[in-house]
Amino acid sequence: MKQTLTTLALFTGANIRRERTRKDVSQEVLAGKIGRTPQYISLLENGHRCGSLKTYLNIANELDVDLYELFICTKENANQSDDERGIRELFFNTTPYERRVMVAILTAARSALQSDT
């Protein structure tokens, strides 16, 4: 698969987010431990920014993962369509309340669409 820098940034960001949430570490805590801001972590996770190798190494060390794990294109994120990635992006950095409301809205919209067919 040919990967552009943008694609790599999206995959790397998704991998950082996945590992960070698996370890139940907030963006704020991770940022503090590596000397960055939570906003910077958010930019990395959303693929809007590429970090330096040193930054990625610090993140990997703090999350206790091998550096290569942040850069691999996993089957999980490679098989997503643009729509799936877009939906996933909508749910990132939301509160539990916001996610519940969004799910309720999507559920209602799906029901309405299915009743029209």
Image (cartoon, rainbow, N blue to C red):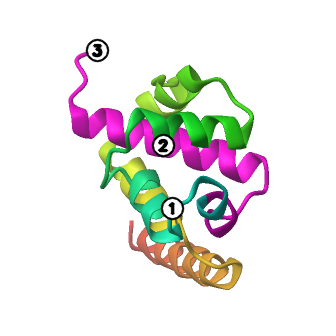
Q: Which of the marked residues, 2 or 1, is nearer the chain's N terminus?
A: 1
- 82 or 25, which is in the foreground? 25
Are the residues flagged by discs 2 and 1 in contact, CB closer than 8 Å?
yes
Q: Which residue is mark 1?
A: 36
* Quadrant holding the N terminus: top left
What range of the chain is rendered magenta?
A: 1-30
Using the numbered discs, state the Cα–Cα distance from disc 2 to disc 3 in whole angstroms: 26 Å
Question: Looking at the picture, does residue 103 appear above or below residue 4?
Answer: below
Q: Main secondary structure of the magenta part?
A: helix
Q: Is residue 11 magenta?
A: yes
- 36 or 70, which is in the foreground? 36
Image disc number at residue 1? 3
* Secondary structure of the residue carrying numbered label 3: loop
Left or right of 43, for residue 107: right
Quarter-of-image position of residue 39: bottom left
* Quadrant holding the C terminus: bottom left
Quarter-of-image position of residue 101: bottom right
* Secondary structure of the residue carrying numbered label 2: helix
Question: Looking at the picture, does residue 10 appear above or below residue 108?
Answer: above
Q: Which residue is mark 2?
A: 55
Q: Residues within 10 Å of mark 1 (few under 14, many from 20)?
A: some
Question: Looking at the picture, does residue 50 appear above or below residue 105?
Answer: above
Q: Residues within 10 Å of mark 3 (few under 14, many from 20)?
A: few
Residue 64 in picture, x, y percent from top left: 74, 34
- 80 or 94, which is in the foreground? 94
